[in-house]
Amino acid sequence: MTDVVVVGAGPVGLAVGVVLAGAGHEVVVLDRLAEGANTSRAAVVHARTLEMLERIGVSDRLVALGVPAAGFSIRDGGRELIGVPFDGLPTKYPYTLMIPQHLTEKVLLERLEELGGTVRRPCAATGITQYDDHAAVTLDTGDTLTARYVVAADGMHSRIRDLAGLGDDTTDTLPLSFSLADVRVDGGLRSEQVELYLATEGVLVVAPLPDGSFRLVAEVEEAPEQLDVAYAQDLLDTRGPTPIGRARAGGPGAGGHGSSRRGASVRVTEVVWGSRFRIHERVAAAYRNGRVVLAGDSAHTHSPAGGQGMNLGLRDALTLGEALSTALTTGDERAIDQYAVQARAEALGVVSLAHRLTRIATAPKLLRPARNFVLHLLGHVPAVRQGLALRLSAVRPEGAPSPEARA
């Protein structure tokens, strides 16, 4: 019997494995994929997460591979509505770190292997049977693994969550369609900050990535299955730093494809990777049932607004890993129960924040000028700017209780 089986080798599952292996526990990490994905997907690691990742010795490695963005700017074309400064935060990491998810996974996997751990792949969990003091996980290979605890870190469509009876929660899908593209450009996009453009034609996020490319995220009427250079160019032309006119019929602003005019100061030269998605909002009704505990997207999913998803999952992983270690060492499971309550409470707050940010960013077209006017007024209030920086980064002011202590 092993101590813990972790199902899922994304950032969350790997981080749980690193915590446990570092504490001397026997842990088996499983994944259904033959190898990790090499697309960027989640690309933001906030300051509070970097602080917590120091516990497992990977923060400096991540910082060395990423791009520090010292601010978050909410804009309407060339006009800044609200500037959110991270460089004044009370932290060793006064920025948000832009780093593709596959690099985060690479660093965590290397750390796991340094500690003697491995990932068993490809194999998928097909069944689970719980007993008083352990659980048995059946694999599609025909093998059965027994462990004192099982961690479900297998994502939004978690098989383990459903098998453990933790899937009966409320799910909401927002009626919004998003395009995502990592692009290379010629021209003047800023590499020192993340920018959110609230244009009349719609919202556009522009964020730097370590290889010199930029992440674009835009809400559109219907995202295409395949994104090309012309489509990405039209997003920048109509919503970006210097909007040059409304999309013609068929452009992203109209739910299709094309561009109204050319000659913008930023020229897209390549689409490195593209995807599309809709927003699902869900928090599991409970994070624990017997020997099974949830972490990451298996427990919560929400809008990517504010770049909170992977950060919340990594904080889950570190707190849960330490709670499991305590239970394995002392036999006292109170830390696991505390995690299940506290992590769910934090997730509800993050989902609410991401929902509000999404609703503001995707306001009805007729309301967008008024929205931008109000945001510009708020942008002159220092407390608003500082409050947003603290909320997005999850950094707590000196003397404030840690999130882990609030359960």
Image (spheres, rainbow, N blue to C red):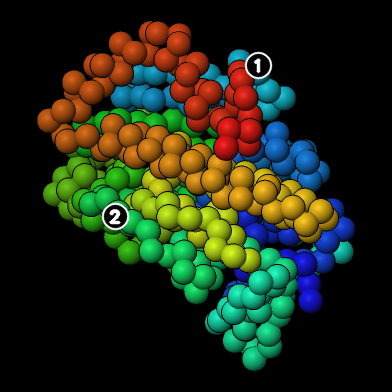
Q: As shown in the figure, which amino acid type bears the numbered disc 1?
A: Glu
Residue 199 appears left or right of 304: left
Q: Which residue is mark 2?
A: 173
Which element type, helix, strand or loop, lies under badge 1? loop
Is residue 68 visible in the rendered structure shown here? Answer: no
At 29% from the left and 60% from the top, the residue drawn is: 224
Q: Which residue is mark 1?
A: 398
At 39% from the left and 53% from the top, the residue drawn is: 282
Residue 269 higher or lower than 204, as above or below = below
Residue 377 appears left or right of 71: left
Residue 263: percent from the left, percent from the top?
A: 32, 36
Residue 16: percent from the left, percent from the top?
A: 70, 56
Q: Residues within 10 Å of mark 1 (few under 14, many from 20)?
A: few
Q: Quarter of the image holding residue 208?
A: top right
Image quarter in which the C terminus is found: top right
Q: Indicate which disc residue 31 carries.
A: none
- Sequence order check, earlier mark of 2 and 1: 2
Residue 144: percent from the left, percent from the top?
A: 68, 85
Residue toward you, 250 or 113: 113
Residue 178 appears left or right of 135: left
Residue toward you, 176 or 184: 176
Q: As shown in the figure, which amino acid type bears the numbered disc 2?
A: Thr
Which element type, helix, strand or loop, lies under badge 2? strand
Image quarter in which the N terminus is found: bottom right
At 43% from the left and 55% from the top, the residue drawn is: 285
